[in-house]
Amino acid sequence: MQLRQYPARVARTLPFLLLLVLAFFATAHAHNITRILAKFPEFSTFNHYLTVTHLAGEINRRTTITVCAVDNAAMSSLLAKHLPLYSLKNVLSLHILLDYFDAKKLHQITNGTALAATLFQATGSAPGSTGFVNITDLKGGKVGFAPENSELIDAYFVKGVEGIKYNISVIQISKILPSEVAAAPTPGPAAVNLTSAMSAHGCKVFADTLLTIPDAEKTFQDGVDGGMTVFCPVDDVFKAFLPKYKNLTAGGKTSLLEYHGVPVYQSMATLKSNNGVMNTLATDGAKKFDFTVQNDGEDVTLQTKIVTAKITGTLLDEDPLAIYTINKVLLPKELFKAEAPTPAPAPSPDEAADAPKGSKKKKKKAASSPADSADSPAASPDEDPADQTADENGAVRFDGKGFGSLVLCVCLLVVTVL
């Protein structure tokens, strides 16, 4: 009798187990550096400037990262240098390591030293190896931090602050990492040449194409001072699109390029909070040329009637200019119509007479299937359905250790119930 009760108990437990699994996936790799540091008043200045420089958004977008925070006293010494905001951003980005280091890992560094890439290196603004940080496990339990090109170790690990295993680690170091390169004067966004900035960071094909249309290039450059957001397709994506682009009329080419610009500065935080329809540089009266911004957690997508593109990176985010990379070319419905399914040829009179009575009904049902819808991914003029599925799922990523722990917990819970 007792054995027969096991299936019923398991059945009653399954909804609870399902909730545990869903909660795990919903929270995997989700972090907010602003909220983490807000719990520690000694880091309030550091936290403030992560927000002002828009580095907080970059930290939150990444799934494996270490933030080397400094306290208010250390930040005061940095602010006393009166660096321009963009130079200050470079200095702070040197304190954001693109790897996971908690207190335990810092004291177990292989061969006593490790070289970590930083967000400063990822921006492309750091020449040579100046965007890397050396981490050294010293004698007496100390761990030192120094820029790769520096022979002096002057900053040390103080303590672990908070973290999410293998996702984000916030640690405290004693001082700001010295770097003349990071602190060097940097031109503000208004002085940035758009096409040069895009060419240097993986959008050269789009930038070169923009230069071939002087009117479009001027529209972009003139809009910088008043506020501008540019969504730039990465090189491989736009290169593959060029054959279709070359088939457009002169006006169509201009509109297609201008469709990738928005005449308002939009930070990443703004894009996430202000979902909805957005006008573009190509919008002109009856010609809407708009798209819909939608976020799913940390992922932000741009949806047209033809394709959905995802923001994959930030080239520049400093009021009044933001430049983001996207994984697909934005296709406006004004230029690209979804391909309608090719109708089947009408049967000859002899074939109609020989066909089963139910054949017409089946053909009609097949013609109305979702796959033939004008807005379905399969009907997109230049997108591979399989590729769209891979790019648009926005699946939460997780490491094997976390999943293994989840499976173990579920198994233990089932055994306990039984």
Image: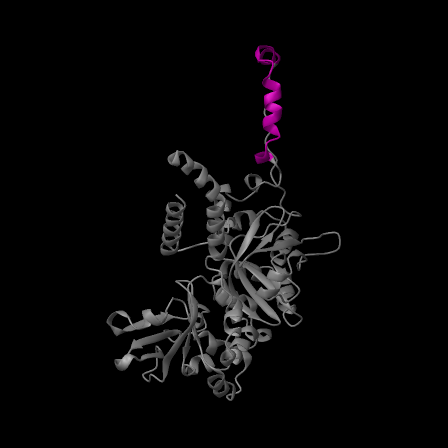
Q: Is residue 341 left or right of residue 403?
A: right
> Does residue 183 appear in this view?
yes
* Start-end of magenta stretch: 349-372
**Picture coordinates of residue 353 (x, y %)?**
60, 10
* Residue 357 highlighted magenta (yes or no): yes
**Picture coordinates of residue 280 (x, y %)?**
66, 58
Q: Is residue 268 left or right of residue 390?
A: right
The outermost residue toward the front is: 1
Reply above or below: 390 against 361. below
Q: What quarter of the picture does the N terminus occupy?
A: top left
Reply above or below: 98 against 188. above
Numbered marks: total: 0
**Picture coordinates of residue 7 (x, y %)?**
42, 36
Instruction: Choose top left, top right, bottom left or bottom right for residue 379.
Output: top right
- State the residue in front, 77 or 357: 77
- State the residue in front, 87 or 5: 5
Residue in view at x 58 percent, y 67 percent? 322
Reply above or below: 216 against 11. below
Residue in view at x 37 percent, y 54 percent? 405
- Per the picture, the main secondary structure of the magenta-coloured stretch is helix
Q: Is residue 359 left or right of residue 29?
A: right
> Does residue 87 appear in this view?
no
Instruction: Choose top left, top right, bottom left or bottom right for residue 53.
Output: bottom right
The outermost residue toward the left is: 111
The color scheme shown is one colour
Residue in view at x 60 percent, y 16 percent? 358
* Residue 187 highlighted magenta (yes or no): no
- State the residue in front, 154 or 19: 19
Q: What quarter of the picture does the C terminus occupy?
A: top left
**Picture coordinates of residue 175 (x, y %)?**
42, 83
